[in-house]
Amino acid sequence: MIHIGIDDTDTIDTAGTNQLARRLAAALPPGFAFVAALRHQLLFDPRIPYTSKNGSASLLVRAERGREARELPAVLEREMRAWYVPGSDPGLCVADAVPEAVMAFGRRCQSEPVRQREARAIAEAHGMYLEGFGGTEDGVIGALAAVGLLATGNDGRVVHLAGWTWPDAFAGEQPVDAVLARGVREVRVLSSGERVHDGVVDVGKHLRPAWRDGGAVLFVEGGAGRWRAVKLQ
């Protein structure tokens, strides 16, 4: 699997990083299959510059036999440069193997401020592609963090899965079977961990499962066949 991270690609009045993640998924060349795009919540703190709530995004991509991660940066960079918004500080990270040090870096970015030079040093030490494309290039921090958090398999909120369209009309009350047919691996009661196999789930304005154990899991609350989605990070 190939892990891609992006961050700081927008300004307060322009389309956000999640939108760019969908664009990058659509731009993947033949031989690379999009799996999922996630939003990761980083530390929300006044000491850290951010556009809205300091979230970064990741993409999980499956490569066919003979294709390699090193083929993707040029394609993704071209899309990001075309998307560039003055005032943003975009960063991009691409990796196939993600070491524990990068996962630990991602978790640190959720609890304390970190510096751009540290992100670059970690990426260089592990031979990972990490680049910025404008402004201060501070987006490399969130881009590396997103790759690390994606690699843990237990962080993030799904914003797009293979086969979904955008805009997405899947909203409101939906049968559990329909939720599972959308690529959600399981529907799980938040309080007990019990799996839900039938009934109706109010997914809200958009279906936004969490990423747990390397797959999409929709957490719910309620009972007696009537459930309400709980959006987690």
Image (tube, rainbow, N blue to C red):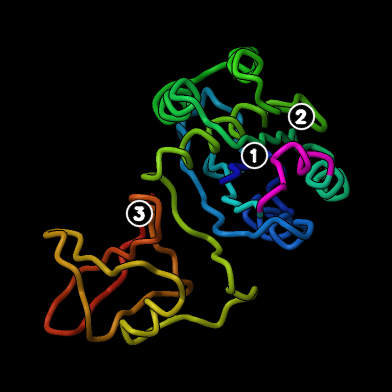
| Quadrant in the rendering for residue 223 | bottom left
**Discs 1, 3 touching: Cβ within 8 Å:** no
Asked if residue 42 is positioned above or below residue 2 in the image, the reply reads: above
Asked if residue 150 is positioned above or below residue 174 in the image, the reply reads: above
Helix, strand or loop for disc 1: strand
The percent coordinates of residue 156 (x first, y second) are: 44, 48
Q: In this figure, which residue is indicated by the disc labeled 2?
A: 132
User: Looking at this rendering, what residue extends furthest in the front direction?
Assistant: 66
Q: In this figure, which residue is indicated by the disc labeled 3?
A: 232
How many numbered discs sit on the rendered protein?
Answer: 3
| Dot placed on the residue nearer the N-terminal end, 2 or 1 | 1
Residues in magenta?
65-74
The percent coordinates of residue 160 (x first, y second) are: 56, 63
- Kindly identify the residue that appears in the image at 66 percent across and 16 percent down: 124
**Discs 2, 3 touching: Cβ within 8 Å:** no
| Dot placed on the residue nearer the N-terminal end, 2 or 3 | 2
Q: In the image shown, does 129 or 166 lie closer to the viewer?
A: 129
Q: Is residue 233 magenta?
A: no
- Kindly identify the residue that appears in the image at 79 percent across and 57 percent down: 29
Q: Amino acid at mark 1?
A: Asp
Mark seen at residue 7: 1
Secondary structure, magenta segment, majority class: helix
**Discs 2, 1 touching: Cβ within 8 Å:** no
Marks 2 and 3 sit apart, C-alpha to C-alpha, by: 29 Å
Helix, strand or loop for disc 2: strand
Horizontally, residue 230 falls left or right of residue 158, namely left
Marks 2 and 1 sit apart, C-alpha to C-alpha, by: 10 Å
Q: Amino acid at mark 2?
A: Gly
Horizontally, residue 75 falls left or right of residue 151, namely right
The percent coordinates of residue 16 (x first, y second) are: 67, 53
The percent coordinates of residue 167 (x first, y second) are: 64, 75
Helix, strand or loop for disc 3: loop
